[in-house]
Image: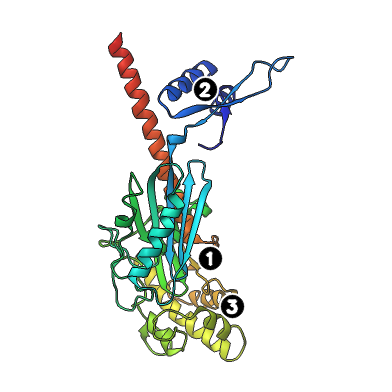
Amino acid sequence: MHQRRLTRAALAEETGISKPSVGESVRRLALAGLVADTGERTPGGRGRGRVGTYYALAAEAGAVLAINVDPEGITAECVDAYGDTLMRAQAALGRPAGPQQVTAAFRMTTERAAGGGPAIRAAVVSAAGPVDRATGRLVRLPDEPFRLGEFDPAAILRPLVSGPVIVDNDVNWAARAERDAAGRGPDGDFAYLFLGEGLGAAVISSGEVVRGHAGLAGEVAHIIVPGPGAARFIDVFGVLGLQQPGSTAIDVPRVLAVTAGPGSGAAVRESIAEAVSGVLAALTALADPEFVVVGGPWGSQPAILDAITARAARLPRPVAIRPAAVTSEPSLAGARAYALSLLRSAILRDARERTGTMAAAARDAR
């Protein structure tokens, strides 16, 4: 699964397993329909040794879908066991996007990504909204900027996918992408704060996302924070005139423009940093992270990040601030990596089950 094709000799060298054992393993996996002779051969003869046969995963190994749903639109990727994207489909969404429009665009995009390719064995969905842990449906919370209603990705995907469909909040997937990029593994303990059109956080504890009883951990918009008077975090941006008209969504271009310069821009930066510090204090008190990663389209802007870092250093319990390492489609990156792990696990499970069945049949025949 890490290389597209290998000979039995190369497999023996890569794994440290003897050539006879590798040869027998390849024979059994081929009989089980999990690997296949590609028809390609190595050069042989004239002192170059025996001709080698290249083997690869069989086509029936399948693929997975990784899907991201956010205010900009929907992106769906079909990914094979090598981690390569076989098909990528996108659909833009209007503003405001209602549940019917999102559902129709989601169905069209996922069908296009999955169509005509390998069988889809699992799907992972990243959604810009709170996700019910038990059902995978999106749920309504007060002041949600991206109003999806009770959007149900799993129900839409069921005809396309033979295996599990995993749905989670986009910030949780972005935090997983940060964990993987840092190579933290099971020892990771940090928090991720996303600052974009929406406001969200995720806590990684012992390498895993803390999702909470209903899956709504990290919904930080209603934390009471300092700033222009004590207020809910989301309301600070309304007071500062930084929300989109008729919505609680943050006006990202306006935030970037207003905070860019000195004078009033510096004052707005300080007000934002003061409000963010209240969220950081809450995360530190409740989760005790080693550090906090700040990401999102305006949270990672250098001047704002510097103001946040300076204010965090003055907290009663200071916490280290790091800029996000994964800045290109972080939520989709996290979903894609998890989808790939599901596919590879399914292939290994197939190998154990099918070769085990073959071995049992051989014993019974004797």
> Where residue 296 sits in the image (x, y, percent)?
50, 69
Residue that badge 1 annotates: 322
Going from N to C along the chain, the mark reached first, 3 or 2, is 2
Q: Label 1: state its secondary structure.
A: strand
CB under 8 Å between discs 3 and 2 = no
Residue under the image location 46 percent in, 89 percent down = 241
Q: Label 2: state its secondary structure.
A: loop
For marks 3 and 1, give the one nearer the viewer. Answer: 3
Residue that badge 2 annotates: 17
Query: Quick one: quadrant of the C terminus?
Result: top left
> Where residue 282 sits in the image (x, y, percent)?
37, 72
**On the image, which quarter does residue 69 sit in?**
bottom left
How busy is the neighbourhood of tag 3: few (under 14 within 10 Å), some, or many (20 plus)?
Answer: some
Question: Looking at the picture, which amino acid does disc 2 mark?
Answer: Ile
> Where residue 305 sits in the image (x, y, percent)?
55, 74
Q: Label 3: state its secondary structure.
A: helix
How busy is the neighbourhood of tag 1: few (under 14 within 10 Å), some, or many (20 plus)?
Answer: some
For the residues labelled 2 and 1, the Cα–Cα distance comes to 43 Å
**Colour convention:** rainbow
Going from N to C along the chain, the mark reached first, 3 or 1, is 3
> Where residue 134 sits in the image (x, y, percent)?
25, 57
Residue 259: which numbered mark, if any? none
Residue under the image location 31 percent in, 13 percent down = 363
How busy is the neighbourhood of tag 2: few (under 14 within 10 Å), some, or many (20 plus)?
Answer: few
For residue 1, side relative to residue 127 (left or right): right
Residue 303: which numbered mark, if any? 3
For the residues labelled 3 and 1, the Cα–Cα distance comes to 14 Å
